[in-house]
Image (cartoon, grey):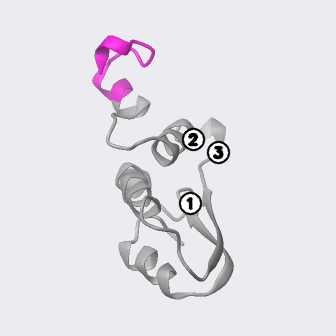
Amino acid sequence: MPASSSKFLQKSRSIKVDTVAYDLEDSVTPGNKAAARKSLRAFLSEPRLEGVGEQAVRINAVDSGYALDDLTEVVSRGGEESSQDKRRRGTNVGDASAS
């Protein structure tokens, strides 16, 4: 399921399958990746789907420059600025005082 589509995210609530894979990779355009991450994080923070055995997230390739942000958003509390956003602002990613 493309994580950039709230329609598909909601549709996944009504299906009964062993696994639903939410995609952050090639089904999401570069300009929509940040919004898709936030949407998916919010969606995954809701109660587990009753008819789904497991939920999986397909992240971008490690060498794409998006993988760390994918992982950070999906496994974090959310709402924090991503490392890619900090790079765009020119902030040192490892600088804790930049938050």
Picture layout, residue 48 above or below residue 35: below
> How much space separates mark 1 and mark 3, taking CA atoms?
10 Å
Q: Quadrant of residue 57?
A: bottom right
Kindly check if marks 1 and 3 are in contact, taking CB atoms under 8 A apart as contact. no
Q: Nearer the viewer, residue 24 or 71?
A: 71
Q: Tell me the tag on residue 26.
A: 1
Horizontal relation, residue 5 to residue 99: left or right: right
Task: Name which residue lies at 29% across and 21% down.
Answer: 99
SS at mark 2 in the image: helix
Residue type (three-letter) at the residue carrying disc 1: Asp
Identify the mark at residue 67; answer none if there is no mark: 2
Discs 2, 3 touching: Cβ within 8 Å:
yes
Q: Residue at 52% x, 65% y: name it.
A: 27
Circle 2 Cα neighbour tier, 10 Å, few/some/many (<14 / 14–19 / ≥20): some
Q: Residue at x 56, y 87 (%)?
A: 15
Mark 2 to mark 3: distance in Å? 6 Å
Asked if the residue at tag 2 contacts the one at tag 1, i.e. Cβ–Cβ closer than 8 Å, the answer is no
- The 10 Å Cα crowd at callout 1, few under 14, some 14 to 19, many 20 or more, is few
Q: Secondary structure at mark 1?
A: loop
Name the residue carrying label 3: 61
Dot 1 or dot 2, earlier in sequence: 1
- The segment highlighted magenta reads 86-99
Residue 34, x across and y down, in percent: 38, 48
Q: Nearer the viewer, mark 1 or mark 2?
A: 2
Of 6 and 50, which appears nearest the observer? Answer: 50
Circle nearer the N terminus (1, 3) = 1
Residue in view at x 56 percent, y 60 percent? 26
Give the SS element for disc 3: loop
Separation of disc 1 and disc 2 at Cα? 12 Å
Q: Which mark is residue 5?
A: none
Q: Characterize the local packing of mark 3: few (<14), some (14-19) or many (20 or more) Cα atoms within 10 angstroms.
A: few
Quick check: 4 above or below 66? below
